[in-house]
Amino acid sequence: MKRKNLDMSTTEAKRTASKTKPAPARKMSGAEMVIEALIEQGVEVIFGYPGGAVLPIYDELFKNKDRIKHVLVRHEQGASHAAEGYARSTGKVGCFLVTSGPGATNAVTGLTDALMDSIPVVCITGQVPSHLIGTDAFQEADTTGITRPCTKHNYLVKDINKLAGTVHEAFHVARSGRPGPVVIDIPKDIQFAQGNYQDASQPTTHTYKPRTAPDMDGIEAAVELMAQAKKPVFYTGGGIINAGPEASKLLRELVRETGFPVTSTLMGLGAFPASGKEWLGMLGMHGTFEANWAMHDCDVMICIGARFDDRVTGRVDAFSPDSVKIHIDIDASSINKNVPVDIGLIADAGEAMKAMLKVWRAKGCKADQPALKKWWKQIEEWRAQKCLSYKNSDTIIKPQYALQRLAHFVAQDKRDAYISTEVGQHQMWAAQFLPFDHPNRWLTSGGLGTMGYGLPAAIGAQMAHKDALVIDVAGEASILMNIQEMSTAVQYRLPVKVFIMNNQWMGMVRQWQELLHGERYSESYTDSLPDFVKLAEAYGGIGLRAETPQELDSVIKEMMKTDKVTLVDVRIDQRENCFPMIPSGKAHNEMILAADAEKFDKKLV
Amino acid sequence: MAKPKEKQNKSVYGATPVAQNVESHTLSVLVVNEPGVLARVIGLFAGRGYNIESLTVAETDHDKHLSRITIVVNGTPRVIEQIKTQLDRMVPVQKVRDLTTSGPYVDRELALVKVKGAGEARIEALRIADIFRAHVVDSTLESFIFEVTGTTAKIDAFINLMRPLGLSDVSRTGIAALSRSKVKKEIKKDPAK
């Protein structure tokens, strides 16, 4: 009796409370829960492709058209990269929805790509009904099993009452710590089942709370080293982009305060402005001469949000042999993984830089000016090598020239510009020749090196920034890997520009074959390519072509004006190679410049 | 004399590193007991090429859904450090403790050992079992099953002794381990005095 009274009084209390805020427990179907939870997590756009096992969720999407926008892609891999492009260009979590079986397996490349490049995405996959799991049912795949090594975390939802909480947790996991992809696999019966919706504010059971604050003793030790440094260098990476725009500002402040030179990995381009006088350009295999030599000769290396990837370090035992290394990374497993460091700090890049600045100022630290002056003089000598120089031509379009002209017109344009790339020579040239002054403007597949990334990523970015200029710098081989997304761009009226650097070769493969495999060009030439102009038109877009340097400017100008998806077929020099280059297994100071390439002994192999 | 030309590395990747000394460590990993957690931990070892010598897992706290995974791994100090940080960053992993480096610990393993034999060998098996404090948990006229607990080395020794006496089957649990409680240095005064 007493208990009953108590119950009544609590329901009464709930009723009064509901006048001010919605009641905490709302009954709804699993599919409704997914949509509610996504909206609560701030998802505005979801990329996806329907199929049998996600039909209940698609039904809810139909009913909620005005609350959440769905972008129908043409292949699930496209959805995954579009979500990545969206995430990378906004700093928010990208979201995509695919069906069971082939839907999920097609998404695997994008998930792996997001894992390698630390991109926060949440992928919802449909699954066959619970009672059919394990029976080799139609379109059944062990999605959680397949995606376990290529996601940060994944879930198979078996209890309807845990569904909403799982979606909230998935977003938390995707965006916190080192960001990454998270998969939620939802059996069809769970999508139909009724249960209690749990909103994001309700306490969850998850215990995932990665550490973001730096250890202050470590920061002080790092600052002390920086103040004594004679030949310092900042080696920055994608971690700064992931730490948000504030972190990029802090990096600029830190560089201004210290006057140290800055280089960055492929993933970190834009964190420090390319127009800054301390900017050395990208480092690594196709990085600049000055950046790589500065890394090799420095005495204090301050690595922030980068992970000593093998494309960056070259030969590890000859990597920056005389430097004291400070490494700031949010992921403890990145520290001492490839290169042993002297000070390892597990922290968010932004928080660590904030702490560094605070300590630097509080202690009244000053950089060693005479030493730094000498260091800069040395760097200027390296710069004078003009490692990116190339021999231009009147008759044939050099890829570097094409990109310089593109950069020129992009700079003149008032719109905010986002550049995505595919993978290969064109990607490296784009990284070398296109300047980035702001974070989140450069979308490229770094870790996994996924050909076919650029077009869907550009679509994702254009969905997020409708008025921006979004260009996919592509190669003719890469673009064909996800060319079907042209159709998506047409459907959603996304004026993405695809700047194809067409040399008919898988350029980077050919370059390696030329330099390291005795010029035996095995399967790297594409004998039959589509007419990209007609192809664009067939999709309902615009096709343009430039065959000579004289045509280039007018074609780019025209491309900038189009209001529909545009393919630009730029016929570039077929023999051009990407330099500078550190051959694999070589040290930073053994890089080959374009001028030395002629002398490179191909008979060594 | 001309210096021999360094052989060009044809691989897209750098040279393979020089081997370092290999150590064996016992890790105690506390994980949330959710579906797939063991597959996740094992997948990490398989995917990154780490070696597992022994692995034991069971739920240790039902209310909090916690399981303890005890793993004996071997690798160079850097690899072991990597294994620990890689484990630690997994979402369901709550705590990773390297028992080998964090003070004294005890580790035990249980084995069931079936020995078939007759006559003098059968009696000898029983005698050795007694020395090893192994229990007989099943007996037929032709066989015994012994249950023996102890360190891995003790169990290895027991199995080796049983081999000539008719060893037939062995089932081992793998290592379970816990760190020892800290011994307080000062002795508490008797409150009565």
Image (cartoon, helix red, strand yellow):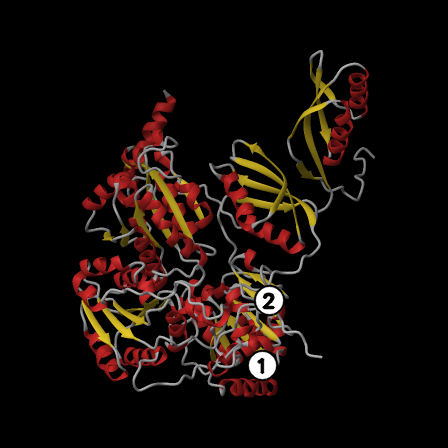
Query: Which residue was labeled with disc 2?
Result: A316
Q: Are marks 2 and 1 on the same chain?
A: yes
Percent position (x, y) of residue A11?
31, 32
Q: Residue furthest top?
A: B141
Instruction: Specify the label residue B75 is tagged with.
Output: none
State the residue position of label 1.
A367
**Amino acid bearing label 2:** Val
Residue A204 visible within the image: no
Secondary structure found at label 1: loop
Q: Dividing the image into 4 quarters, which one contains the C terminus of chain A?
A: bottom right
Crowd band around label 2 with a 10 angstrom C-alpha radius: few (<14), some (14–19), many (20+) = many
Q: Is residue A246 above or below residue A8?
A: below
Labelled pair 2, 1 in contact (Cβ < 8 Å):
no
Q: Residue furthest right?
A: B193
The correct choice, above or below, for A268 with respect to A100 in the image is below
Residue A152 location (% of width, % of height) = 45, 50
**Mark closest to the chain's N terminus, 2 or 1:** 2
Within the image, what quadrant is residue B131 found in?
A: top right
From the image, state whether disc 2 or disc 1 is nearer to you.
2
The N terminus of chain A is located in which quarter?
Answer: top left
Nearest to the observer: residue A470 or residue B18: B18
Q: Secondary structure at mark 2?
A: helix
Question: Is A101 placed left or right of A588 in the picture?
Answer: left
Asked if one can make out residue A457 in the rendered structure from this viewpoint, the answer is yes
Q: Give the alpha-carbon distance from disc 2 to disc 1, as whole Å.
A: 29 Å
B148 with respect to A562 (left or right): right
Vertical arrangement, residue A48 with respect to residue A368, above or below: above
Label 1 sits on what residue type? Ala
